[in-house]
Image (cartoon, helix red, strand yellow):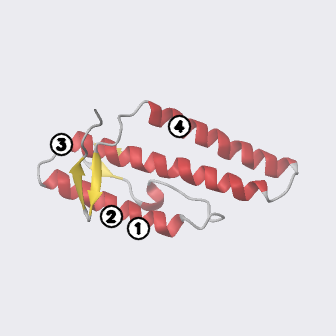
Amino acid sequence: MRGEDWLACGTAALGFDPICGDGTAQSVREAILAAAVVTGIAEGQDATALLTHYQSMLIAAMRRHLLLCAQFYTTGGTGDWWRAQQEALLEGHRWCTGLLAKMPEPAFLLEGTRLAPRQQAA
């Protein structure tokens, strides 16, 4: 989703299942976040921290999306195909959860269209 000097955006970063209807809203949120990350880097903020924040926010968005889709697929039927889809979605959710567990807590808050350092909890 990101490199030292690049960000993947849109379907190059995440591909949402259209069954959920969340793809358009996600693309807008992602574009705002990507613009804020690029602005922060251009203004001299910690590029590594900003890029890590971007990556973790996208993983969190995918994690949420997978759980939402699993709810839709639960109502689709009880056949083998539907059960396999549900299990794949839940496996993806577990995988994203594992990735997020290894990443630092979000270090920034979006204030308008800019990222501001987040105060750490005591």
Residue at left offset 53%, top offset 40%: 96
SS label for mark 4: helix
Q: Mark 1 and mark 2 in contact? Answer it, CB < 8 Å.
A: yes
* Gap in angstroms between the C-alphas marked 1 and 4: 23 Å
Residue at left offset 29%, top offset 45%: 51
Q: Is residue 74 left or right of residue 59?
A: right
Tell which residue pokes out farthest to the top in this image. Answer: 102
Quickly name the residue at label 3.
46
Mark 4 or mark 2: which comes first in sequence?
2
Q: Residues within 10 Å of mark 1 (few under 14, many from 20)?
A: few
Residue 99 in the image: state x and y as whole percent: 48, 35
Q: Residue type at mark 3?
A: Asp
Quickly name the residue at label 1.
28
Tell me if residue 14 can be seen: yes
Q: Quadrant of residue 3?
A: top left
Q: Residue type at mark 2?
A: Ile
Residue 112 in the image: state x and y as whole percent: 26, 65
Q: Mark 1 and mark 4 in contact? Answer it, CB < 8 Å.
A: no
Quickly name the residue at label 2.
32
Residue at left offset 25%, top offset 59%: 36
Quickly name the residue at label 4.
97
